[in-house]
Image: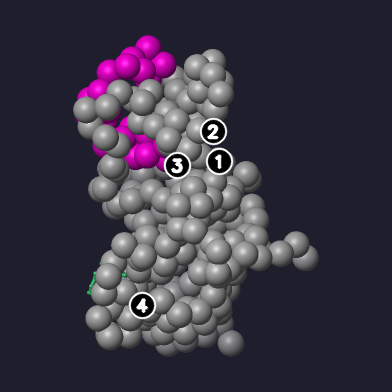
Amino acid sequence: MPEPVLVVRNLNIWYAGRHVVKNVSFEVPDRSVFALMGPSGSGKSTILRAINRLLDLYEEAEVQGEVLLDGVNVYGPGVDAPWVRRRVGMVFQYPNPFPHMSIYDNVAIGPRLNRLVKSKRELDELVRWALERAYLWDEVKDRLHQPAAKLSGGQKQRLSIARALALKPRLLLMDEPTANLDPVATEKIEELILDLKKDIPILLVTHDPQQAARVSDYTGFLYYGELVEVGPTGKIFTEPENPLTERYLLRSLGSPRARPVD
Ligand SMILES: Nc1ncnc2c1ncn2[C@@H]1O[C@H](COP(=O)(O)OP(=O)(O)OP(=O)(O)O)[C@@H](O)[C@H]1O
Ligand SMILES: [Mg+2]
């Protein structure tokens, strides 16, 4: 078995002394989607922010444990946070392109700042590749220099994905990327997730178990800081071992699940 791209081991996080993530361990293998689900306030976003070291920016936060990216502990000595943030892309619940900046520049800014390209032509190619990969190119190719603010919500979210992809990250974190989108825009993002995972593994936070069931290979159920259940998505949805998982699924899915007859 190849080494998983991401290994989280005994992760503990405190905000101002309050223990909000408790000894969490899980792995995200290459070519897979891992869905992290759980009620509001259970620590999902906090775990994502620990993985790409965004939590360094929160003075009140303390992190212990290991986050291994291709075997390298991102909290190890000599590892700097900007390097981690380049290797680990992040897409948020609210699409966050710079509204006054053009569509082109929103994608180009990362590669420019990080000096990833040597010429305008190379940059043009990278921008086009990222927009194509994010299923947006055809819709914007004739207006690359218009402000991003003019795009629809779903397009803005795909632009955020293109912006993350332009840095060629090793892992993509998505924090409820469809929470503010209509069903059609949501379906498009879910299709995109299934396509992207062939090249880049995805850790997806979702409130919606049905979304986890549709797109993920593995699911973890986080309950107030504890990862009470983790495993292949099919198993979690058909035979959860923890009663908390079962209760959450029953409530969220709104109807009794079919039970095997014994
Ligand atoms: N900067 C902060 N300072 C103090 N406490 C915080 C901070 N950010 C989050 N918390 C607390 O940490 C816990 C976990 O929050 P987090 O945002 O990770 O949950 P979540 O699972 O992402 O919730 P949601 O589904 O609502 O987005 C919550 O109790 C929250 O109130
Ligand atoms: Mg959150």
> Could you tell whether 61 is left or right of 262 in the image?
left
Residue at which label 3 appears: 164
Q: Residue at x 23, y 32 (%)?
A: 99
Read off the magenta span: 140-163
Q: Position of residue 163 (x, y in %)?
A: 42, 37
Residue at which label 1 appears: 168
User: Which badge, 2 or 1, comes first in the chain's sequence?
Assistant: 2
> Type of residue at label 4?
Glu
Q: Which residue is at the front of the view, 163 or 210?
A: 163
State the CA–CA distance, disc 2 to disc 3. 14 Å
State the CA–CA distance, disc 4 to disc 3. 26 Å
Instruction: Tell which tag, 2 or 3, sits nearer the viewer.
Output: 2
Q: Is residue 157 magenta?
A: yes
- What SS does tag 4 mark? strand
How many other residues sit within 10 Å of disc 2, few (<14), some (14-19) or many (≥20)? some
Whether residue 194 is visible to the viewer of this picture, yes or no, is no
Q: Is residue 12 above or below residue 106?
A: below
Q: Are marks 2 and 3 in contact (CB under 8 Å)?
A: no
State the CA–CA distance, disc 1 to disc 3. 8 Å
The secondary structure making up most of the magenta span is helix
